[in-house]
Amino acid sequence: MSTPLSTPLSTPLRATLSTPLRTPRPAASRVATLARVRLMPGDGPRLVDGAWWPRSVDLMAELPRMLRALPHSWPQIVHVTVNSAMWSDFPGRMLIANHVLQLHRGTGRNTPSTVCLLAPGRGRWDLLVIPPHTDEAEAMRLMAGAATP
């Protein structure tokens, strides 16, 4: 199930963090803090709701960055399911912005290269996860395809 919570295709690929930086950082440092997320516009049933291209396989570093880049209109995500084979080891939960996020390991064919974001009673969003080592041109093609209705 998807809800009308998405970013139009015209939105830049790199979304900035929602928390402002307190001290100016060099441009190269700021680029490393940007999440590479693209969301499909509109509402309705679909296989994926967008794509995420993390910079590393460290879920504990990448997930908070991605969640902060989601639209402010989205409800609070409470559960996240990822393919455990794709990520370095991670705990069953983590604290992000003073709320506990439950992390679940998926190993079946339902989660081969996706992340499932769940806000109970509010919605579920499945994003294609593009491996961090993917060539930039290929990653951009995959992200555009995942965000096209």
Image (cartoon, rainbow, N blue to C red):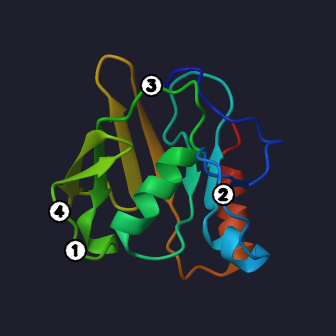
Give the left or right position of residue 93, taking residue 131 as reference. left
Label 4 – label 2 distance at C-alpha: 28 Å
Residue 5 against residue 36 in the figure, above or below = above
Mark 3: give few (<14), some (14-19) or many (20+) Cα within 10 Å. some
**Which of the 4 image quarters holds residue 40?**
top right
The residue tagged 1 is: 89
Residue that label 3 marks: 75
First along the sequence among labels 3 and 2: 3
Instruction: Say if mark 4 contacts mark 2, CB within 8 Å.
Output: no
- Residue 141 percent location from the top left of the image: 72, 64
Q: Residue furthest top?
A: 121
Amino acid beneath label 1: Asp
Q: Secondary structure at mark 2?
A: helix
Mark with earlier residue (4, 2):
4
Label 2 amino acid? Met
Q: Is residue 40 left or right of residue 98?
A: right
The answer to the question of whether label 3 and label 2 lie on touching residues, with beta carbons closer than 8 A, is: no
Q: Nearer the viewer, residue 74 or 117?
A: 74
Question: Is the residue 120 above or below the residue 67 in the image?
Answer: above
